[in-house]
């Protein structure tokens, strides 16, 4: 497996390095030390044509200025925390807020805005980048000094394996994800409406105003949120469903079934023949279909159109700390946090 490195830019007078892992099948993954952001994933289509199947802006300057989250390591807590408030061990906390009075994606200086250290490793059947970061007590309002590692591993089986590990010196919260957006056409001018999605999921979380979870989980069977059989995204994203209309698309958490399920998600696109198969030990996946034009920046020189890509953000359910039954995102000194998500790339 090949590993190359180059300077991607400068952040606060420090060099940002881009590492590229390449296997012998023409699949490569590039990621930078700023925000542990994946800058591209190149895969062949059914005719062997290699293209980038992810969304990202062209420059570090755009990433820093606009924080689009594309491909970024997100935390301490992915998603929204209502009013930036929570209780832990009887103590109330007020986090820094950064979207309509809530905390989104770890706050104004979340993990995606930090310069991580990195080391690479190459083996016969895989190559990896191990990113490491210390998030200090009080950052974005969180208790505890947090040591975080996230490893991106590319294998000769065309798998991108993400492993998060974390330790804290005081009880805190941790619910990370990667904010990758896929567009399997390899052409940013084509929306993802005709991608096909299948999910091992029978429940989804509903949203209220400010895109906040209501705390309710609804059955998806027979609704726009039912992807138990392969379904084109347009049938959901353009539906009149009362949960989809306000968001102009999907921006919802789907509870994942893991019992006896070999995979949790399959995303494919018929013309390129590309397919991504996702397995994870996380309880849910937030699927956001990039529902509006983002006119502050371009992607590969093109406008960032609605439905330019979709995320598969594996995580515990959003705002879990504030909703009983949404899972446990508390991390305590005696514990080590582990999560693993694999995206495998092939063609059909
Ligand atoms: C997540 C949220 C969306 C949006 C994106 C970032 O997917 O659920 O509402 O904020 O992040 O643009």
Image (cartoon, grey):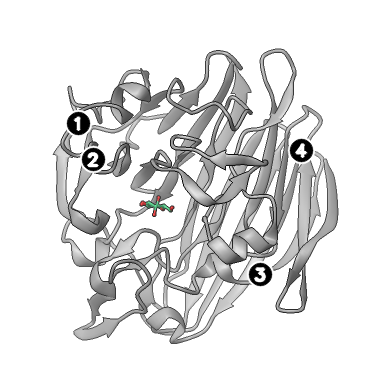
Give the CA distance from mark 2 to mark 1.
6 Å
Q: Where 44 falls versus 96 (above or below)? A: above
Which one is in front in this view, the residue at disc 4 or the one at disc 2? 2
Q: Can you give x and y, in whole percent of width and height, for residue 302 in the image? A: 62, 39
Q: Nearer the viewer, residue 27 or 263?
A: 27
**Contact, mark 2 vs mark 1 (Cβ under 8 Å):** yes
Q: Which residue is mark 3?
A: 116
Residue at image coords 58%, 65%: 65
Q: Where 286 falls versus 189 (above or below)? A: below
Q: Earlier in the sequence, mark 2 or mark 1?
A: 2
Residue at image coords 19%, 84%: 90
Q: Can you give x and y, in whole percent of width and height, for residue 56 in the image? A: 61, 47
Q: Which mark is residue 125?
A: 4
Q: Nearer the viewer, residue 274 or 315?
A: 274
Rendering quarter of residue 129: bottom right
Give the CA distance from mark 2 to mark 3.
33 Å
Give the CA distance from mark 4 to mark 2.
37 Å
Q: Which residue is mark 2?
A: 204
Describe the element under mark 1 as helix, strand or loop.
Answer: loop
Give the CA distance from mark 4 to mark 3.
25 Å
């Amino acid at each position: 497996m090949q590993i190359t490195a180059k300077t991607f830019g400068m952040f606060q007078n420090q060099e940002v390095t881009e590492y590229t892992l390449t296997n012998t099948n023409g699949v490569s993954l590039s990621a930078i030390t700023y925000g542990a952001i994946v800058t591209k994933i190149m895969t062949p289509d059914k005719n062997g044509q290699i293209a980038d199947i992810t969304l990202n802006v062209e420059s570090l300057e755009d990433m820093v200025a606009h924080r689009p989250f594309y491909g970024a390591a997100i935390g301490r807590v992915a998603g929204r925390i209502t009013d930036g408030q929570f209780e832990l061990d009887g103590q109330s906390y007020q986090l820094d807020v950064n979207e309509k009075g809530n905390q989104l994606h770890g706050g104004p200086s979340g993990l995606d805005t930090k310069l991580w250290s990195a080391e690479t490793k190459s083996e016969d059947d895989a190559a990896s980048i191990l990113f490491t970061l210390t998030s200090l007590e009080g950052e974005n309002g969180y208790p505890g000094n947090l040591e975080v590692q996230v490893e991106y591993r590319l294998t000769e089986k065309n798998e991108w394996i993400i492993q998060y590990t974390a330790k804290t010196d005081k009880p805190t919260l941790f619910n990370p994800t990667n904010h990758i957006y896929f567009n399997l056409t390899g052409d940013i001018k084509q929306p993802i409406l005709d991608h096909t999605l299948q999910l091992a999921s029978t429940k989804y979380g509903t949203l209220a105003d400010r895109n906040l979870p209501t705390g309710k989980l609804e059955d998806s069977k027979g609704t726009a949120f039912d992807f138990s059989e392969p379904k084109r995204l347009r049938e959901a994203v353009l539906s009149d469903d009362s949960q989809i209309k306000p968001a102009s698309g999907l921006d919802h958490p789907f509870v994942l079934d893991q019992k006896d399920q070999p995979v949790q998600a399959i995303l494919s696109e018929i013309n390129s023949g590309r397919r991504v198969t996702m397995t994870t030990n996380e309880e849910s996946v937030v699927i956001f279909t990039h529902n509006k034009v983002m006119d502050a920046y371009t992607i590969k020189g093109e406008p960032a159109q609605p439905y330019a890509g979709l995320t598969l953000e594996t995580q515990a359910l959003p705002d879990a700390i504030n909703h009983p039954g949404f899972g446990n995102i508390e991390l305590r000194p005696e514990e080590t946090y582990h999560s693993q998500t694999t995206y495998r790339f092939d063609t059909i």
